[in-house]
């Protein structure tokens, strides 16, 4: 079930914005991984390119979402799409940045 109900026309805009974002992100990643000389960028440049894609997506979403819906998107939905749930700074083993593997014995 959706976090909030959207009219069909608004749902179409959000679906398009999110789908376009993921297609563009995948294309950018593939170009970087293939060694495309045009994509040989520094990590900061890559992050800036990804941030621009996110900003473009968010601008499209803001045209159809209310402030409350957009807040729900940013605080609940978007983090879950990024594989969130581990908390800020935690690695997959339960430790913080550079932390040791969590021993549950």
Image (spheres, rainbow, N blue to C red):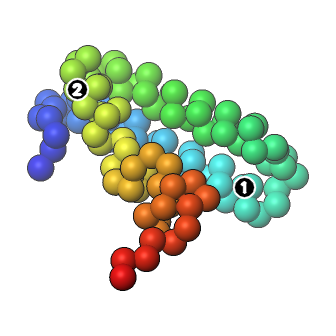
Which x, y percent locates residue 85? 34, 54
N-term-proximal mark, 2 vs 1: 1
Label 2 crowd bin: few (<14), some (14–19), many (20+), radius 10 Å = some
Which residue is disc 2 drawn over? Answer: 69
Location of residue 93 with respect to 26 vertically, above or below? below
Disc 1 element:
helix
Q: Please state which of residues 25 and 10 is positioned toward the viewer in this rendering.
A: 25
- Which residue is pictured at 74% across the width and 55% down the height? 32
Q: Is residue 32 above or below residue 46?
A: below
Percent from the top left, x then y, of residue 13?
32, 32
The image shows residue 62 at horizontal and vertical percentages of: 35, 21
Front residue of this view, candidates 46 and 13: 46
* Point 50% across, 49% down: residue: 89
Residue 88 rendering spot, x and y as whole percentages: 45, 46
Identify the residue under disc 1: 31
For the residues marked 2 and 1, what is the alpha-carbon distance in whole angstroms? 34 Å
């Amino acid at each position: 079930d959706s976090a909030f109900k959207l009219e069909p026309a608004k749902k179409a805009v959000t679906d398009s914005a999110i789908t376009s974002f993921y297609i563009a992100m995948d294309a950018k990643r593939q170009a970087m991984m293939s060694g495309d000389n045009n994509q040989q960028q520094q990590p900061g440049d890559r992050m800036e390119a990804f941030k621009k894609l996110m900003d473009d997506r968010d601008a499209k979403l803001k045209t159809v979402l209310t402030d409350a819906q957009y807040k729900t998107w940013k605080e609940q939905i978007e983090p879950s799409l990024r594989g969130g749930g581990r908390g800020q700074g935690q690695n997959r083993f339960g430790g913080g940045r550079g932390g040791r593997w969590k021993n549950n014995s």
